[in-house]
Image: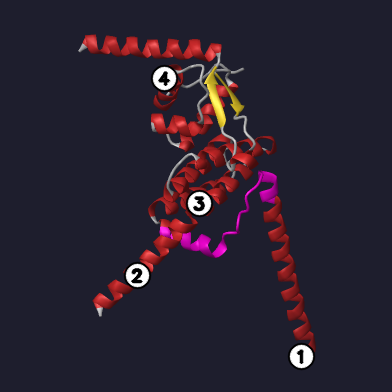
């Protein structure tokens, strides 16, 4: 029984690792977008493009992901977080990513939005559109729920 | 322009690397590969050195849509940065020499 569980865990682990390797460049680009988006408006475009170019110069998907974690740290140093909770949350996320990347990746497999190629502004617009779309969808679900309640 | 630059070990490594070919622009990735300074430390340091007037930077002249990749940003030492970096490294070398002599 133990052998079966070990084999199953190994198979699931290797599947997750393969998936993480596959999505690592997208995760890296997403992290760079997040890192740049927390800088001052006048600095975002510059660092976003520079950090994307930086990722482009490194071979290997996991190396790119590790670099993008560094870019998040750089953005915190360029514009320190004022809120203590936000600082702690970011530190927790970075620690989780460093020590248990598979667990961290699982969250993002579920929640990560697809990042298109393009400038910082275009990417932010895409994220905003997605947020508006999600909000509208939630409102529609909520309204349908209210209608159902009324009908009862 | 602020002159107050903390000359930490990573800063000195980057300055030494830039001094090797002071007229050539170097990208952040190139500096990281050569000096082993991580991006979390490197980019804030480059921003500080640039705002202090030690470095200047410019975009690579390419069309990203044609090249199929984003433009790199190249950094090089200014005249002030060149003098300051050489002086800092010379001080360090002298201090190291004195330390060795004291042993």
Q: Chain of mark 1?
A: A
Give the number of the mark in front: 1 or 4.
4
Residue drawn at (63%, 40%), measured in percent from left and top? B66
Question: In the drawing, does residue A77 fall left or right of residue A96?
Answer: right
Q: Residue tagged by mark 1?
A: A152
The magenta-colored residue range is: A102-124
Q: Which residue is mark 3?
A: A25
- CA distance separating discs 1 and 4: 76 Å
Instruction: Residue at 69%, 65% (x, y): give it.
Output: A134
The residue where tag 4 is placed is B16
Q: Give the residue pinned by disc 2.
A: A11
Task: Indicate which disc, 3 or 1, sits on the residue closer to the N terminus.
Answer: 3
Tell me the quarter of the image containing the N terminus of chain B.
top right
Task: Tell me if label 2 and label 1 are in contact, CB under 8 Å.
Answer: no
Find residue A152 and report its image quarter.
bottom right
Of all residues, the one furthest to the left in this rendering is B103
């Amino acid at each position: 029984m133990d052998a079966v569980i070990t084999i199953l865990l190994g198979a699931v682990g290797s599947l997750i690792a393969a998936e993480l390797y596959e999505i690592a460049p997208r995760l890296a680009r997403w992290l760079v977008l997040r890192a740049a988006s927390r800088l001052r408006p006048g600095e975002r475009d510059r660092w976003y493009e520079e950090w994307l170019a930086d990722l482009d110069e490194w071979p290997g998907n996991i190396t790119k992901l590790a670099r993008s974690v560094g870019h998040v740290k750089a953005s915190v140093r360029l514009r320190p977080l004022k809120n203590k909770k936000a600082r702690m949350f970011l530190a927790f996320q970075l620690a989780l990513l460093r020590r248990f990347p598979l667990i961290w990746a699982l969250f993002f497999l579920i929640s990560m939005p697809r990042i298109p190629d393009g400038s910082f502004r275009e990417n932010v617009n895409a994220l905003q559109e997605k947020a508006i779309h999600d909000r509208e969808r939630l409102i529609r679900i909520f309204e349908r729920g209210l209608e159902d309640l009324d009908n009862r | 322009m602020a002159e107050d630059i903390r000359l930490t070990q990573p800063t000195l490594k980057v300055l030494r690397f830039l001094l090797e070919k002071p007229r050539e622009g170097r990208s952040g990735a190139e500096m990281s590969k050569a000096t082993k300074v991580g991006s979390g430390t490197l980019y804030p340091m480059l921003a500080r050195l640039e705002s202090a007037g030690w470095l200047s930077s410019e975009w690579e002249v390419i069309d990203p849509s044609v090249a199929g990749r984003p433009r790199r940003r190249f950094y090089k030492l200014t005249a002030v940065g060149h003098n300051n970096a050489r002086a800092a490294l010379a001080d360090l070398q002298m201090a190291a020499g004195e330390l060795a002599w004291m042993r």
